[in-house]
Amino acid sequence: MATDQISFFDESLQKKVEGSFTSDGREIHVRSVYGIKSFPYNDLGACIDYDAQVSTVKKVLSAMVRNAAKA
């Protein structure tokens, strides 16, 4: 399993978000300084290409940042 690094600027948070993700063929595992979260491929819908994975990982990372800010 290769680990992909991801970094993007979240406009709604006005913050740079960084993390990484791996895929084991059944789930995608997201890691950042805000925690670890896994989700099944089913969450990607009908399109499970790399771009769909990256898009979903960005949403998950943004949610992790928002949840950390609330705590």
Image (cartoon, rainbow, N blue to C red):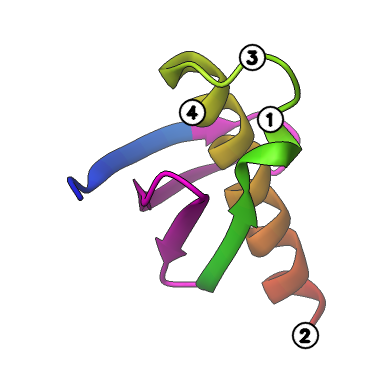
SS assignment at label 1 = helix
Magenta residue span: 9-34
Q: Give the residue at mark 4.
A: 54
The disc at residue 71 is 2
Q: Which residue is mark 1?
A: 44
Alpha carbons under labels 2 and 4: distance apart? 26 Å
Residue at 22% x, 48% y: name it: 3
Looking at the picture, does residue 38 appear above or below residue 10?
Answer: below
- In front of the other: label 3 or label 4? 3
The reply to whether callout 4 and callout 1 are in contact (CB within 8 Å) is no
Query: CA gap, disc 3 to disc 2?
Result: 33 Å
Q: Would you say the residues marked 1 and 3 are in contact, meaning their CB atoms lie under 8 Å apart?
A: yes
Q: Tag 2 or tag 3, which sits nearer the N-term? A: 3
> SS at mark 2?
loop
Residue type, mark 3 in image: Cys
In the image, taking residue 1 as reference, residue 70 lies left or right, namely right
Type of the residue with mark 2: Ala
Give the alpha-carbon distance from disc 1 to disc 3, as whole Å: 6 Å
How far apart marks 3 and 4 lie (CA) works out to 12 Å
- Crowding around mark 4 (Cα neighbors within 10 Å: few <14, some 14 to 19, many 20+) is some
Q: Above or below — where is 24 with respect to 37?
A: above
SS class, disc 3: loop
Dot 2 or dot 4, earlier in sequence: 4
Residue matched to label 3 = 47
Q: Is residue 70 magenta?
A: no
